[in-house]
Image (tube, coloured by chain):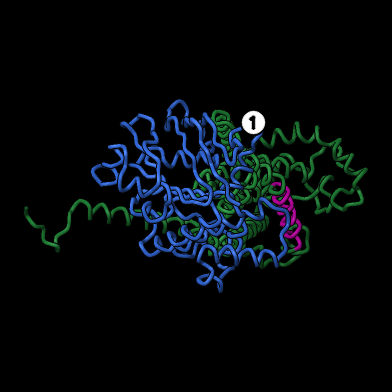
Amino acid sequence: MTATPLSSSQGAGRAGDKIFSGAALAAGCLILAVLFGVALFLVVQAIPALTAPAAEIQGGEGFFAYIWPIVIGTLIAAVIALVIATPVAIGVALFISHFAPRGLASGLGYIVDLLAAIPSVVYGAWGAAFLAKEISPAYNWLAENMGWLPIFQGPASATGKTILTAGIVLSVMVLPIITSLSREIFLQTPKLHEEAALALGATRWEMIKMSVLPFARPGIISAVMLGLGRALGETMAVALVLSSGALTASLITSGNQTIAAEIALNFPEASGLKVSTLIAAGLVLFVITLGVNMFARWIITRHKEFSGAN
Amino acid sequence: MSKRIDVKDLNVYYGDFLAVEDISINIEAKSVTAFIGPSGCGKSTFLRTLNRMHEVLPGARVEGEVLMDGENLYGPGVDPVTVRSQIGMVFQRPNPFPTMSIRDNVLAGVKLNNKKISKGEADVLVERSLQSANLWNEVKDRLEKPGSGLSGGQQQRLCIARAIAVEPQVILMDEPCSALDPISTLAIEDLINDLKDQYTVVIVTHNMQQAARVSDKTAFFNIAGTGKPGKLIEYGNTQNIFSNPTVKATEDYVSGRFG
């Protein structure tokens, strides 16, 4: 047996190690560089709009007065989408991972993934041409019976092209994202923890409450945040579905606007300060998304001690 | 609160594969019964049929009868959830719920089976269960900390506390010490000795010394070869099984000649 001196090292393995760590480092740096580049572009281009005299900005009352209604509109649409999509997505994911017979589960999972492959313009067209029309009787009903709530104040839009319709369309679009991710997490729940619950005499639903959902909680939050990212930034579907206008509390009348749709609808004809204003709106959307993601990270790490990672 | 278990002509399947064949065994109340045998001989599989955990796996099923004080666990209309709440189980690897505190882990089963429990009652129950599991002194100052922060041996005793908190009739243990160091193993063995005053304990173990130390009766399982079903070869008082077994295979196994 020939002894290899400890100081020598296996050439090929070493080189592979270096190449891999270099590539990983480069990929990580690239992400940061791209993010920084986008942020820099947005800030530089937005400065004229942010510093311009109030009267020159669209609406004539300055950038803040211009932006805040559409920030609110964006958040309303995204919140509607998540409120509808999250429980449905978790339910579907649980059904696929823990209730459905195996054959059905894989078919269903495939169909859900297919939903994500549909282009957003198709969703927009569906929402504008079909859903809006079909749903307007429901809006009339809401206006008549629950009109005392500011969000359902009448008169309802006759075309149905409202922020609520846009939110519903968005919810269908974010559903596959949340479902697929949640399903993957649910399937990763350690058998050991599931059996711990079952052996104590838990029913299937109790087992899910005791082992699966606590285990999956950080994953669900991440999935919802990814969905939120899509809902905040979605342009085409909202632009097609929503008959936009000034900010209104009622969800069932036309009005409201989202940042992404506002940019898309106005950008082609914009010039000069108007371009700057739209880019500044993009900057605001960028900051909102960043803030939302940081908030989600904070929620996830807050319970680290109990996460099961230790 | 402890019941005997009588198994009659039990066949256990995974799908079409017969894993354990024709088991008949009588397990005494308030005693410790050990299952020993080489890996893959079906002793864990058989143990899991005693609280209907076997059927959790897809395609797994059972033929035959398991009677707990005369009542068939596999009878029509018997709810496996109820069976499991009366027959507790401790697993090979400690599995406290990672997202729950030590206190909530102990109370997990009680909160399932039961109605509301007042805070005072819960405190008493937590202390009593942890006392019985010989864990109280080590954790009494950190009941609100996560159970996953304990050492492996402490986690396993926490799982035992969780199992006895619901006051089961029978406690099944599936190689409870195989992931533990010798000191923790000793602690669990002492605990098993205390538990048999109140409970019927069935333990699967790979460690023959352990079986000899803790059990009153021992059952030896074996397989004829891979792909063949596991069978109960010999069952009797632990002393007899180890000092003077009647079957050659048992003698070979306990004397370390194979397996």
Q: Which chain is green?
A: A
Residue A166 is situated, as x and y percent measured from the top left of the image, at 73, 43
At x 51%, y 36%, the residue is: B7
**A18 left or right, relative to B149:** left
Which residue extends farthest bottom?
B141
Which residue is labeled 1 in the image?
B76
10 Å neighbourhood of mark 1: few (<14), some, or many (≥20)? Answer: few
**Chain for numbered disc 1:** B
Residue A299 is situated, as x and y percent measured from the top left of the image, at 60, 61
At x 40%, y 54%, the residue is: A27
In the image, residue A175 sits, relative to residue A20, either above or below, namely above
A69 in magenta: yes
Magenta-colored span: A65-81
**A268 left or right, relative to A152:** left
Q: Amino acid at mark 1?
A: Pro
* Chain B representation colour: blue
Front-most of residues A254 and A227 = A227
Task: Tell me which corner region of the image, top left, top right, bottom left or bottom right, holds residue B167.
Answer: bottom right
Which residue extends farthest top?
B16
